[in-house]
Image (cartoon, grey):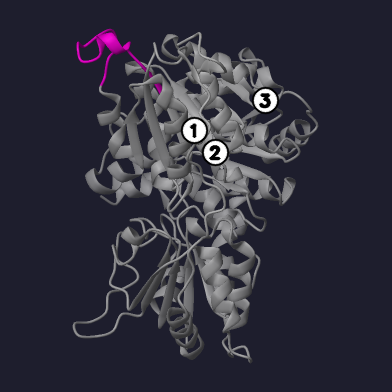
Amino acid sequence: MSDLPHARTAAAQAVDVLAAAGVRRCYTVPGESFLELTDAMDQHPDFTLVSTRHEGGASFMAEADAKLTGIPAVAAATRGPGAANLAVGVHTAQQDSTPMVVFLGQVESDYLGREAFQEVDLTAFYQPITKWATTVHRADRLAEVTAQAVRVATTGRPGPVAIAVPEDLFGVRTPQLERLPGVGNIPRPTLTTGDRDRLGAWLAAAERPVLIAGGGTRSARESLMALAECYNIGVFTSWRRQDHFPNDHPLYLGHLGLGCPTEIVATLESADAILVVGSRLSEITTQTYRLPEPAPPGGTPAVAQIDIDPDQIGAVTRVWLGAVADADEALSALTEVAPATVPDRDWSRAHTAWLDTTTPPSEVANHAGPGLHPAAVVEHLRHALPAETILASDAGNFAAFVQRGWHFTRPGTQLAPTSGAMGYGVPGAVAAKLCAPDRCVVALAGDGGALMTGQELETAVRFGLPVLTVVFQNGLYGTIAMHQARRLGRTAAVTIGGPLDLAEWARGLGAHATCATTLGELDKAIESARAQTDTPTLIDVRVDPDVISPTANLSELLDGR
């Protein structure tokens, strides 16, 4: 096939398809089973190939990239071990509804099914954690399948797709395809006239209508604000979607996250009309599938749901109206039929109730220790950093202080895994800085998550990315310690050593680094980090291990057992 006119490698054609769709970056640990693919990406003028220190870091970077830009990024890995390491970020993309294209190098075609070196059935492995997983068996189909993958990843509810390719196919030269499937300008579904009018009348007539804004509203911020103001309805954000609605808006009622304060839950419980938009109503958003409360037997539910994915409508709670529609289109349509006079509803007490939950008590700043109070650390970060700062937050109990104490007032400022995957923070920040080099980017992590993927600081050093990483070091897997204390009255396997000299570790990777044991030292370290122009900085913040959550101390949980 190499003598065919206009023939190019299958890998080069696949990269052309990606570039034409606006994909600009691939994150990978290079492997021998996709040599021609990485070569084609490296040679393409519109592509940036990012070599990472671990496949988990690569997939987290691709997820953060796509979450921030709305355009798929590529994560690539070699067969068995590489594919297994990559899976954590792919599962994150699946639960976060983030578009991603995954390439998995497979064993050679002649060896398939023989348990060859590092062989795994990659299609079967990835099928449960992707929208679509497939194996390509012909080189001349790779470009076509790549175009199909982009279309699947970006239409309907977005998500990751995985393409496994035997390594001998990437380098085969095939004729250029003249026609490929693609996304193009596919119309986004909107509400029918009937549904629009019924929902509009319902929202206008309710006494305490509220809206739960999920991941589907990421690109619908302006229409979401317009609808809330036209109908005067309160807005909650779902789990880790706090930047979808300005938190300083008087109609903002709070974040439906882990450990949601009772004041916020009470406002939701008192609502007589709940419109759910672009949210799959996860376990955490619904407070363990408790809210919105179901209608009594024979009663009419007080819930309506709009989602791009028909499988999500009514999946968690019974709704009186469900509509398959794009969030932005639907919210705009509802605004068109808003009442001429804004309904008279007073949300000031509910907004103030949320605001009060974000303000740490005065004694927090003077916490006696040992170590700083995590809420005070968040408070100082919030006042020192610009509102446009992108926060890439890891999973862990430290994050509860971030999600309670940070005010997300600008769009595109929150990167955090709804899957609760540890290790997201540092890789997420690296990708964010590549996507938005002019923005301040901060990674927030506990010492557990930081030591899983913190080696990606070297990737930031290599690319000259001045990201700031703040590690809340308490020497514990804090979330598990909290659960053990509550349920068992003792802890096991949660101590992870320390205090470790994480600043010295970061300097070994080429970053600037310092340790902060006082709030004054923290302030100086933040100021110094912001002055960096091409080198990442890590601040090792020593926090009190007893302050395990915004509402509990570990010692009290153990003593109360």
- Residue that numbered label 2 is attached to: 64
- Label 1, label 2: how many angstroms apart (C-alpha)? 6 Å
Magenta: main secondary structure equals loop
Pick whichever of labels 1 and 3 is earlier in the sequence.
1
For mark 1, give the secondary structure.
helix
Please say if 556 is above or below 128. below
Pick whichever of labels 2 and 3 is earlier in the sequence.
2
Examine the rendering and report whether any part of residue 240 can be seen: yes
Label 1 neighbourhood size at 10 Å, few (<14), some (14-19), many (20+)?
Answer: many
- Magenta-tinted stretch: 104-120
| Whole-percent x, y for residue 79 in the image | 35, 17
- Residue that numbered label 3 is attached to: 514
The answer to whether mark 1 and mark 2 are in CB contact below 8 A is yes
| Whole-percent x, y for residue 250 in the image | 63, 73
| Whole-percent x, y for residue 74 in the image | 51, 30
**Residue nearest the viewer, comparing 254 with 317:** 317
The answer to whether mark 2 and mark 3 are in CB contact below 8 A is no
Q: Viewed as shown, does residue 111 lie left or right of 472?
A: left
Label 2 neighbourhood size at 10 Å, few (<14), some (14-19), many (20+)?
Answer: many
Please say if 499 is above or below 185. above
- Label 2, label 3: how many angstroms apart (C-alpha)? 26 Å
User: How many dots with numbers?
Assistant: 3
Please tell me whether mark 2 or mark 3 is closer to you in this view: 2
| Amino acid beneath label 2 | Ala
Residue, x 45% and y 76% (percent of image)? 192
- Residue that numbered label 1 is attached to: 60
